[in-house]
Image (cartoon, helix red, strand yellow):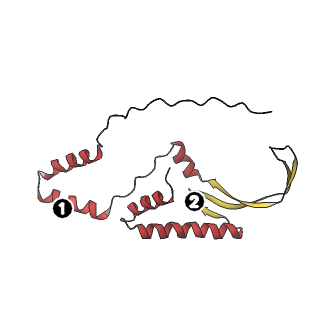
Amino acid sequence: MPNKAQFIDLLAERMDGDRKRAAAALDAVIDTVYASVAKGERVVLTGFGIFEKRHRAARKARNPATGASVNVKKTAVPAFKAGTQFKEITSGARKLAKAPAKKAAAKAPAKKAAAKAPAKKAVPAKKAAAKAPAKKAPAKRAPAKKAPAKKAAR
């Protein structure tokens, strides 16, 4: 699961390696969603989902530790509802479109392939070798010891 820094790196790959632009774009989107939802507006990203503010009424709840009844004030909370396309991709019903290749990388091999006929055979071999990572033997570990189960006090 990528965190924000890893997500920025993934965006940067799609934005020609410009990490600063990717970080600024992500921050701008997040800040805009924050501001709009805080005002009570709905942010609808068609296919992706809806961000909105939901109001919770005041209610009585129970403290699980003591069992005492507690009054909970009314509040507003952020909510997200996934869009149809997001649901389909998540469930596997729809395939995710592949990211476009970098412009500079796509142009350079095409020129070399047109100039030399034997280079066509060498290019796929290099790509296949680069994609196949070297397999390492799994490290042997001692089996994990299980801690004795604690009994809950009642």
Circle 2 residues within 10 Å: few <14, some 14–19, many ≥20? few
Q: Does residue 19 sit above or below 96 in this rendering?
A: below
Label drawn at residue 92: none
- In this view, the residue in front, 4 or 105, is 4
Q: Does residue 74 sit above or below 142 in this rendering?
A: below
Q: Which residue is painted at 51% across and 47% down in the image?
A: 89
Secondary structure beneath label 2: loop
Q: Quadrant of residue 31?
A: bottom right
CB under 8 Å between discs 2 and 1? no
Q: Does residue 59 sit above or below 128 in this rendering?
A: below
Label drawn at residue 111: 1
Secondary structure beneath label 1: helix
Q: Which residue is mark 2?
A: 46
Q: Quadrant of residue 67?
A: top right
Q: Position of residue 106 (x, y in %)?
A: 27, 60
- In this view, the residue in front, 143 or 100, is 143
* 50 sits to left or right of 142: right
Q: Which residue is painted at 16% across and 47% down in the image?
A: 121
